[in-house]
Amino acid sequence: MIPHEPVLVEQVLEYLQPRPGGRYLDGTLGFGGHALAVLEKTDGRAEILGLDRDQDALNAAMDRLIRAWPEARVIAGNERFSRFPLPMQKLGWEALDGALLDLGVSSHQVDSPERGFSFLRDGPLDMRMDPRGTGLTAREVVNSYPPRQLAKIIGQFGEDPLAGRIARHIDQARRSAPIETTLELARVVEAAYPPARRAKSRNHPATRTFQALRMFVNDEAGELAEFLKQIVPFLVPEGRLVIISFHSLEDRMVKRFFMEQAKACLCPPRQPFCLCGHKTTMRILTKKPVTASSQEVAANPRSRSAKLRAACRVSGT
Ligand SMILES: C[S@@+](CC[C@H](N)C(=O)[O-])C[C@H]1O[C@@H](n2cnc3c(N)ncnc32)[C@H](O)[C@@H]1O
């Protein structure tokens, strides 16, 4: 079984429009499902730079891609996608025909208890996408951040209306002993939920808290913001940018970015002449976010919250 089923594959190909000889950045290679589709579409003749923070995912993806297309030019980089210009420079690549981000974590990461992403399996509270790195872990955040900051993280990234209550419960629980494992944390969060609310909720009460901690620990919103700031000049004219997000905050960031890039001027509407110097750099290809069909959601429930947006660089900018 494939450890991660890619979402919206047909739609990615439709908007990325990969062609033989084209150069593509897959900033979230994961298990290489989308990259494989690009190779299949181009008869193995697209060049792909695949990045992932997770070395194990990269190894598995490369095995899979090389086995399927031994002659293909696929280069893997254990790098954050916000730093994509670096590996491009090393390769001597100046421009991209397209770039893809499929944000968040893979099913394999979530299903590996030792990674600490899941509240359904017991494991250490880690949640780093790059577990070999030295970055902050969820354990440190949960046990050392002041309750107010915890509440802010759970509110902002988890959009949980009970963020303050959950933070107070965490603070109370960690006074007797540090919270070490995913199931310990899940129990504390569950206890913060009033029983009536727990009964009404479709998801486990810890869903949003875990999502929030994961996003915070990996600075996911910061990564996306940094990537967006840099990507446009690296795209060839008519080069495509395709982004799949699973969180409303990230979808909003992509939507706003595309809208700004599509505008000819960013000055306030009542200003009589333009002072901003901004020019249209991108054309939006998806008026509304593209979502998975009911068949895809039935086959792959993870696709339920996926939103794909695409834009292309405008010629002559
Ligand atoms: C949803 S999965 C991608 C799945 C992939 N498209 C496939 O078809 O198998 C997201 C992957 O992106 C990686 N990732 C998330 N944020 C990243 C970042 N800022 N830089 C590099 N890799 C990142 C994760 O480690 C994970 O393997």
Image (tube, rainbow, N blue to C red):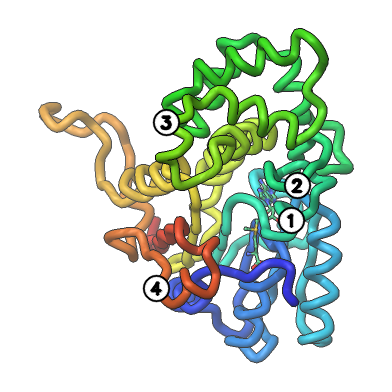
Task: Look at the image and tell me in which quarter the C terminus lies.
Answer: bottom left
In space, the residues marked 4 and 2 are separated at their CA atoms by 29 Å
**Could you tell me the amino acid type at mark 1?**
Asp
Q: Identify the residue under disc 4.
A: 293
Secondary structure at badge 4 equals loop
Q: Quadrant of ligand 1?
A: bottom right
Query: Could you tell me which residue is drawn at 29 percent across and 59 percent down?
Result: 288
Q: Residue furthest right?
A: 132
Asked whether the residues under the numbered discs 3 and 2 touch, taking CB atoms below 8 Å apart as contact, a structural biologist would say no
Secondary structure at badge 3 equals helix
Q: Identify the residue under disc 1.
A: 111
Q: Identify the residue under disc 3.
A: 196
Asked whether the residues under the numbered discs 3 and 1 touch, taking CB atoms below 8 Å apart as contact, a structural biologist would say no
Residue 268 in which image quadrant: top left
Asked whether the residues under the numbered discs 1 and 2 touch, taking CB atoms below 8 Å apart as contact, a structural biologist would say yes
In space, the residues marked 3 and 1 are separated at their CA atoms by 29 Å
- The disc, 3 or 1, on the residue closer to the chain's N-terminal end is 1
Neighbours of disc 1 within 10 Å: few (<14), some (14-19), many (20+): some
Q: Give left or right: position of 215 versus 262.
A: right
Q: Identify the residue under disc 2.
A: 121
Work out whether residue 92 can be spotted. yes
Query: Could you tell me which residue is drawn at 66 percent across and 33 percent down?
Result: 186
Asked whether the residues under the numbered discs 4 and 2 touch, taking CB atoms below 8 Å apart as contact, a structural biologist would say no
Query: Is ligand 1 closer than 8 angstroms to the Cβ of mark 3?
Result: no
Asked whether the residues under the numbered discs 4 and 1 touch, taking CB atoms below 8 Å apart as contact, a structural biologist would say no
In space, the residues marked 3 and 4 are separated at their CA atoms by 33 Å
- The disc, 4 or 1, on the residue closer to the chain's N-terminal end is 1
In space, the residues marked 4 and 1 are separated at their CA atoms by 24 Å
Q: Nearer the viewer, residue 264 or 306?
A: 306
**Could you tell me the amino acid type at mark 2?**
Arg
